[in-house]
Each structure stands twice: as C-alpha cells, then as structure tokens.
Image (cartoon, rainbow, N blue to C red):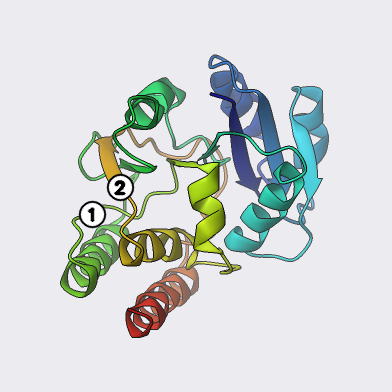
Amino acid sequence: MRVDLLIPALNEEKNMPSVLGGAQTYRFRRIVVADNGSTDRTADVAERAGAIVVNAPQRGYGSACLAGLNFMRKDPPDVVMFMDGDGADDPSDIEAVLQPIFDGEADLVIGSRTRGQADPGALTPVQRFGNALSCTLLRLVFGVHFTDLGPFRAVRWPILETLDMADRDFGWTVEMQAKAARKGIRCHEVPVTYRVRHAGQSKVSGNIKGSIQAGIKILYTIGVEALKK
C-alpha cells in the first residue's frame, strides 16, 4: 500500500528535525508538512529534511490537515497517517498503528495514548478528563468504544473521502471519529507511547483558553453529528 504521512505544524522549527528523522525510519511514499502560518523556520527546516511543505495560512489544526489533504488529492495514497509535529508521538509506533489496516481488520485506526504509556506530564488532567467525557458521549450516542481522541492515526484514503471532513480547528479528530461511527466504518485502537513535547508549548493543553476552546468545540462537534444520526 502507498502510505503518506501528514504532519500539521505551527512554529515547530525546533521539533522538526527529530520528528522527521523519526518518521523517515518508515518508508512513507511522501511526508507532507502542512505549515499553519508559522512565524519561525518550520517550513525551511522541514524542506531541508526532505518533507514536502504545503502552505496552510488559515490558522487551525483542521485547516492545516485540510490543506495537506487537498495537496495529496492530486495523487492520493492508499492510506494517510496523521502525526503531530511536536515530537510527542513516538515514531516507533508507526507500524503498530498501520498494521490493522494492512491486515484488513480496520479502515480507521486511532493511536490511544490512554491505553499506552504516557510520560509523566505528557497528558494533562484536563486532557484526560476531556478525552474520557468525549469518548463516553461517543459511546452513548453512537455505540462505539473509543478511549482517546489522539492525533496519531491512520485511515484508508477512500474511507476518509467519504467522511467529508470540514472542521478547521479543535474538532478535527472527534469529527473524524464521530462521522466514522455514524457511518458504521470499521474502527480500531492500538496503544501508543505519548511523550512530553520536545520543545515549546502546546497550542491547546498549554494554556487554559486553548483547553476551554477545544473542549467546547469537541462537545459541539459531537452534538452536530448526533443530530445527523
């Protein structure tokens, strides 16, 4: 299968070398970095490391992902993997996340940080509470069992296209899971290691405002998809 990696990134200049170096241990067809309006040298460092850089000037995690997918659509892969650019996702878990798709057992695989090993401080209490609440709502509304909304995931391209992803910020990951659940798509979780980000501060969990905004958007997104059920 042709597998492409998509890394949304905002001001991750210091993390790009280690993230891309780790990702390049797996034979991805392409590694695409969606630069979300960085004010540092994220794009330059990524290009020098061999990644394809796509400009995604409209701020927002989902916006960066959408820009990267729009680029890939010209020559789509069989599978697209998403990984963050902060160094928190462990590249040694790449094959474990992809394997259920390769084995024909799943169309969407979520790397679960709560089922795996999280470094002390990597997942804040707010993140753990938000994950638990969101996954409980997904189970009550759609009857699916998730333990995490983690960004480290892989999905078959044809399936991703049917989801018609639209969220441009904090609701991206839960939108994908809620839509997949509503459509009866085969989902699977595998435990993954989650590390403290290498450098800089998280755009979401690193501040109270970001955490509140993310929480509201996640709950709103679940509500919207529930009404479509």
In the depicted structure, whether residue 218 falls above or below residue 204 = below
Residue highlighted by disc 1 = 146
Residue closest to the eye, 147 or 126 = 147
Q: Is residue 83 left or right of residue 185?
A: right
* Real-space Cα separation, disc 2 to disc 1, in angstroms: 9 Å
Quadrant holding the C terminus: bottom left
Question: Looking at the image, which residue is at 39% across and 42% down?
Answer: 107
In the depicted structure, whether residue 210 falls above or below residue 93 = below
Mark 1, secondary structure of its residue: loop
Q: Is residue 167 left or right of residue 40?
A: left
Question: Looking at the image, which residue is at 65% across and 23% down?
Answer: 29
> Is residue 178 visible in this depiction of the protein?
yes
Amino acid type, residue under disc 2 in the picture:
Cys
Badge 1 crowding class, 10 Å Cα cut-off, few under 14, some 14 to 19, many 20 or more, is: many
Give the mark nearer the N terminus: 2 vs 1.
1
Whether label 2 touches label 1, CB < 8 Å: yes
**How far from the left and from the top, in percent, is residue 3?**
57, 28
**How far from the left and from the top, in percent, is residue 130?**
29, 66
Question: Looking at the image, which residue is at 47% across and 65% down?
Answer: 207
